[in-house]
Image (tube, grey):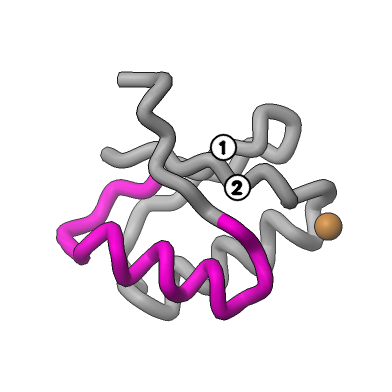
């Protein structure tokens, strides 16, 4: 599992858009979005860079969260 910080998510709509972007890369990915902590957890065999690119394309600014294990 990789955690990403997506600091410009503000509401449930954002969470939905980010989830769709992740599913667009890997439909089998397990995604959990927490808008309050601006975090997105992804479990997938796909490359992290692909998720970052897809979330960016959806209009958000993701970063790999190195502060959490
Ligand atoms: Cu929103």
**Residue that lies at the very extreme toward the left in this rendered image:** 45
Which residue is disc 2 drawn over?
A: 6
Q: Which mark is residue 8?
A: none
Check if mark 2's residue and mark 1's residue have beta carbons within 8 Å.
yes
User: Could you tell me which residue is drawn at 35 percent across and 73 percent down?
Assistant: 27
The image quarter containing residue 50 is bottom left
Ligand 1 quadrant in view? bottom right
Q: Residues within 10 Å of mark 1 (few under 14, many from 20)?
A: many
Q: Is residue 20 shown left or right of residue 24?
A: right
**Figure label count:** 2
Q: Position of residue 14 (x, y in %)?
A: 74, 59
User: Could you tell me which residue is drawn at 27 percent across and 39 percent down?
Assistant: 1
| Of the image marks 2 and 1, the number of the one nearer the N terminus | 2
Distance between the alpha carbons at the discs numbered 2 and 1: 6 Å
Q: Is residue 42 above or below residue 53?
A: above
Helix, strand or loop status at disc 1: strand
Q: Is residue 43 shown left or right of residue 63?
A: left
Asked whether mark 1 lies closer than 8 Å to ligand 1, one says no
Mark nearest the camera among 2 and 1 is 2
Q: Position of residue 63 (x, y in %)?
A: 47, 47
Q: Is residue 28 above or below residue 30?
A: below
Q: Is residue 22 above or below residue 38?
A: below
Q: Position of residue 69 (x, y in %)?
A: 30, 20
Which residue is disc 1 drawn over?
A: 39
Instruction: Tell me which segment is drawn in magenta.
Output: 42-61
Q: Is residue 45 magenta?
A: yes
Q: Position of residue 4 (x, y in %)?
A: 45, 43
Q: Is residue 26 shown left or right of residue 65?
A: left
């Amino acid at each position: 599992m990789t955690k990403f910080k997506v600091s410009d998510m503000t509401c449930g709509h954002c969470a939905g858009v980010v989830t769709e972007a992740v599913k667009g890369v890997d439909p089998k990915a397990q995604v959990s979005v927490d808008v309050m902590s601006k975090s997105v957890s992804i479990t997938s065999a796909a490359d992290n860079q692909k998720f970052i690119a897809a979330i960016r394309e959806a209009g958000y600014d993701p970063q790999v969260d190195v502060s959490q294990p």
